[in-house]
Amino acid sequence: KAGVTQTPRYLIKTRGQQVTLSCSPISGHRSVSWYQQTPGQGLQFLFEYFSETQRNKGNFPGRFSGRQFSNSRSEMNVSTLELGDSALYLCASSLPSSDTQYFGPGTRLTVL
Amino acid sequence: GESVGLHLPTLSVQEGDNSIINCAYSNSASDYFIWYKQESGKGPQFIIDIRSNMDKRQGQRVTVLLNKTVKHLSLQIAATQPGDSAVYFCAEMSRAGNMLTFGGGTRLMVKP
């Protein structure tokens, strides 16, 4: 079974721009969570989607948003990029009946 | 907010020795704990998990121990191999939300 896939793997943007990252969960997984990983703050929860609805949200500004489609694929968007948004953005998926989250390889975002 | 072992120590072991990686958590409401391994350039990889109604769980070459009295979690790796070299993260989840709170990670270095 294919794992969680994320596209693109690498992205370079400039301040003020916006970016959209994509995540395809493992087949059959309906919950998708997003995390930001930086050397200074570690892994931090952004939000979680289940059946196209946001169930949980972390402590990030409104510039960070996401959505989930009927096929469970998810996207996250960051508007008005700041230098501090440079990070590895990780997506994880899980089965409806399980707490175990499986991660994708991440998208490395660099903001110049 | 709640924290889980926010530091990044380094553990250096000889190939073939056993490794023990420790993690402290602070949320007594957490009832699910998980260990991940992250290699450079990759997303976190699931190793083993444990629920709060257990104090020990074993996998292949790995054992997780949970001490709820002192809010301590440990990962034991038997016969450590060079391929075990990575950063290891513990994470917790409470019933308050379907999201993982991560520790700062421990870097494991295996000397041949």
Image (cartoon, grey):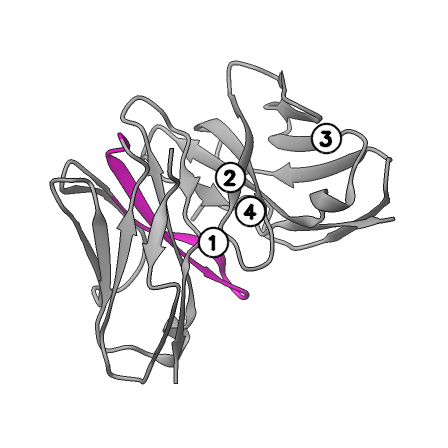
Do residues under tags 4 and 3 come within 8 Å of each other at their CB atoms?
no
**What's the residue at 52%, 33% (across, down)?**
B34
Chain of the residue on which disc 1 is drawn: A
Measure the alpha-carbon separation of dots 3 and 1.
Answer: 22 Å
**What's the residue at 21%, 72% (across, down)?**
A79
Q: Quick one: SS at disc 3?
A: strand
Image depth: mark 4 or mark 3 in front = 3
Amino acid type, label 3: Gln
Q: Which residues are magenta?
A: A28-48
Amino acid type, label 4: Gly
The residue that mark 1 highlights is A43
Q: Quick one: SS at disc 1?
A: strand
Crowding at mark 4 (Cα within 10 Å: few <14, some 14-19, many 20+): many
Q: Quadrant of residue A98?
A: top left
Do residues under tags 3 and 1 come within 8 Å of each other at their CB atoms?
no
In the image: residue A67, left or right of residue B42: left
Q: Quick one: SS at disc 4?
A: loop
**Which of pointers 4 and 2 lies earlier in the amino acid sequence?**
2
Where does the image place residue A46, in percent across and percent down from the top left?
A: 32, 53
Do residues under tags 4 and 2 come within 8 Å of each other at their CB atoms?
yes
The residue that mark 3 highlights is B76
Chain of the residue on which disc 4 is drawn: B
Crowding at mark 2 (Cα within 10 Å: few <14, some 14-19, many 20+): many
**What's the residue at 40%, 31% (across, down)?**
B94
Instruction: Characterize the magenta stretch by its predominant secondary structure.
Output: strand
Amino acid type, label 2: Ala
Chain of the residue on which disc 3 is drawn: B
The residue that mark 4 highlights is B103
Q: Quadrant of residue A25?
A: top left
